[in-house]
Image (cartoon, rainbow, N blue to C red):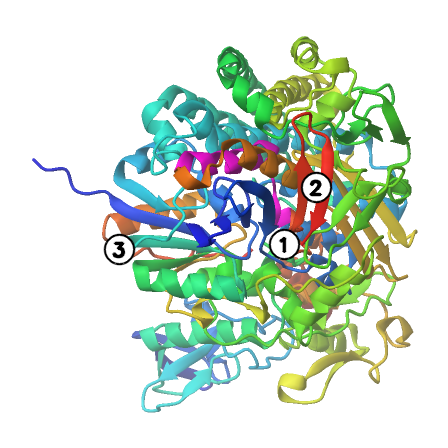
Amino acid sequence: MTKSPKIRVATVWLSGCSGCHMSFLDIDERLIDLAKKITVVYSPIADVKEFPENVDVTLIEGAVANEEQLEMLKKVRTRTKILISLGDCAVDGNVTALRNSWRKSDQAILERAYKDPTDLNAAIPNAVPKLLVNARPLHEIVKVDFYIPGCPPHADLIYYVLTELLAGRTPIMEGRSKYG
Amino acid sequence: MSIGTVKLKIDGVEVNVPENTMILKAAKDTGVVIPTLCNLEGVTSYGGCRLCLVEISGSPKLFPACITPVSNGMEVTTNSDRLKEYRKMVVQMLLAERTHICSVCVADDHCELQAMANQLGVDHVMFERNWSHDEIDSTHDFLVIDRNRCILCTRCIRVCDQIEGVHTLDLKLRGKDSQVIMDLDEHWGNSCSCTSCRKCAKVCPVGAIYIEGEPIEHTKKKDIAEFIIARRNRK
Amino acid sequence: MVKIQQEKTITINPITRIEGHAKVDILLNKDESVKEAIFKVVDFRGFEKFTEGRPFYEMPSITSRACGICPVSHLLASAKACDAIVGVNPPKTAIMLRRLMHMGQLIQSHALNFFHLSSPDLLLGFDSDPAQRNIFGLIEKEPNLAMRGIKLRKFGQEMIEKVAGKKIHSSDWILPGGAKWPLTQERADYLNANLPEALDNTQKTLEIYKKMLDGFEEEIENFGNFPSYYMGLVTADGGLEHYDGKIRIMDKNGKVAAECVDPTKYREFIGEAVEPWSFMKFPYFKAIGYPDGAYRVGPLARLNVASFCGTPLADEELKQFKKLGKNGVVQSTFHYHYARLIELLFCIETAKDLLENPEILSEHVTSKALVNNYEGVGVAEAPRGTLIHHYKVDPQGMITWNNMIIATEHNNIAYNMAITQVAKKYVKSKQLQEGMLNRVEAVIRAFDPCLSCATHAVGRMPLEVKLIDANGQLLDRKIR
């Protein structure tokens, strides 16, 4: 009897705090069982450097805050079947998007961070990925197949969604999805 | 059928209620719960949040159950697929209109809007958010208003006017510019009518009005607030 | 991706198995020998700005979201800054519980770095197959060790949860002037019941690791092995400390260079520089100046600046540890791993002591107060080093100004020195192999950077270049 191939799973973090990835690791011992069913083909906690083709499920944490992340998100969308917004930052902006309340928020945060308080050489740097004017949730840029809100989403919820998807079922979010 | 009683169907079940009963109450008396946010027992109904929209056969329109009276032969549907979608849309619109970030809000886990989103399965907001940026008014000794979280349910205004009786709170401007104000748009600390009774904080469904330094779970007890209102209402 | 962009640069992008976003550029000479290496961090959120106008009591909840691995560090530093604003000393039990939560955090964070992030290099090998060189590969090849790691991290997280209600971003529990609810007997019993296993897991891992050390002689010699200053909190009598105490700065030879007894006066000791080509700031020791006043923080630094731990098992280990360096100062970045394991031991012993104190169950955890001071500073030792939150508020308590100096930032200059040293030793651009570049990444992992924290206000670390000789002496410094 041939073994069914492992599902190819990837995780990405954009502009977030990595708390959603930590919450994923909070599935603790269940990680060992999950590891039998999935191959992690790309992740910040694994050593693959280039996002591969033919990914089955990608979990993305964090909002899109700069142009590099924008490009990464678009690339991931073309290379994965199911794209999941993981956590409030990816789902709706959350804390990363608190800056959006300021007009031209990209300029506002740069101005504030580099003038004061700095003891030497106060100046705004100009050699980094260009910030987007607003931090954006993922679905404003690409089509998202599934959302897991929470800050972070509880480990049990992440585990539920993954196992339902692996079993070919659609997870039910009424009563489960919770912001914050 | 005695005078003053109306016969109607709610979700296919026949019910008899006194005339002039609102659909919301008629449904509640028969065990059907229609979701609401701006509704508050003991004060007048407002019909502002639109969560309680129901279908009435014979009309393509939707009707807010809290301010629509029953009539004979009416057939009400409280929970169709269309209504579920619309309710999710309403919650999403509320979340998009101002700045709602549950994770860092004082009302996190004790918020009726958050709970409603959870109940309905709202897992993202399809509308672009406005990211309003109103200044917080913390000039009162302990009452704070953050208008970025206000959903304009007007519970605070109604309870201040109808129960405390001082009408410190009201609305200024219209549409998306509407704001809850104190007196003639004063800072709360300068209000001469406010009695500091805190009912507004108790009935606010979200983290817009709260009491500084008091754990939110002590402040926001809707059932206690409605108890107080019922006691004040007795003749 | 690993890419040779021009003839002259090798880029490692992204650095994996660290927290946050980073790249390394290895710049080559004309003959393709390594000239220098640069550590770049590429995310920026802007906490200093977007917290303006928020009430001070929201700061723990907002700053917690700076990092998902060490949110507790921010909760505590923020809580202490808020305590200063309300002008209240929290009740003793509240402080004990905050400390207990802090121990939980250190346990889970150190376990994460050692087992999930670093041990794939240490146990599977720096040159092993990249597709397997991660926690999943570890689960397959070293299941016992992987299980120890998962359980230790779980225990740390559960300690946080039992105290504060949630494992990650447990801001609901923290209050200016104290905490919201006490510890129940039931939760204390749960933690006590799981302590022995956690202790056993840590001790067994330490034993295994110490036996492996001989096999890492080359790495110990070359992974960021250079003299530097060190900074960390210590108790009044110089013991290991994570929550309170005074800031001690130690020089390269093990002498105390300065002590900031009142951590709120940190600006007299620590300056921040900006380079025009970098988003990340450069903290430096003001008495020496920039950039020679570079210092390191984190587990290695804390064990260097502390004279003792204060708990028996950790003290035994510390004695052995200090023998690894001249004058008891251990200079190799590789030994961050060893230091982390010793701190793990210390935290478990300390948690045990806290839980044995009957006062931990007292219900008096809240103080009542509103704004009394218009400025507050909170300092704590995050897993990765000294963390400072500094707030200014208006009379209503709305934040007017906020500065956060993050643990990882302090190590900024050291990062660049370390990766340059490793690149020069191992990277042969003409016969480039993946394992060589992995070693550059591995020295970064040893520091255990928390870049989401560090880029609360920053986009990229400095393009600072150091030329260091074999003795770790700074020969030259170039700014790009």
The amino acid type of the residue labelled 2 equals Ile
In the rendered structure, find residue A54 and report the number of the disc placed on it. 3
Q: Secondary structure at mark 2?
A: helix
Inter-mark Cα distance, 2 to 3:
40 Å
The amino acid type of the residue labelled 1 equals Arg
Looking at the rendered structure, whether the residues under marks 2 and 1 are on a common chain is answered as yes
Q: Quadrant of the N terminus of chain B?
A: bottom left
Q: Which residue is mark 2?
A: C413
Residue drawn at the location 38% of the way across and 72% of the way down: B84
Q: Secondary structure at mark 1?
A: loop
Q: Which residue is mark 1?
A: C460
Residue drawn at the location 54% of the way across and 31% of the way down: C425
Could you tell me if residue C180 is visible in this image? no
Taking the image as shown, residue C65 lies to the left or right of residue C176, namely left
Q: Is residue C405 above or below residue C469?
A: below
**Mark 2 vs 1, N-terminal side:** 2
Q: Chain of mark 1?
A: C
The amino acid type of the residue labelled 3 equals Asn
Taking the image as shown, residue A58 lies to the left or right of residue C367, namely left
**Viewer-nearest residue: C333 or C47:** C333
Mark 2 Cα-neighbour bin, 10 Å: few <14, some 14–19, many ≥20: many
Q: Cβ–Cβ below 8 Å for labels 2 and 1?
A: no
Q: Secondary structure at mark 3?
A: loop
Q: Position of residue B157 (x, y in %)?
A: 72, 77
Residue range of the region highlighted in magenta in the rendering: C434-453
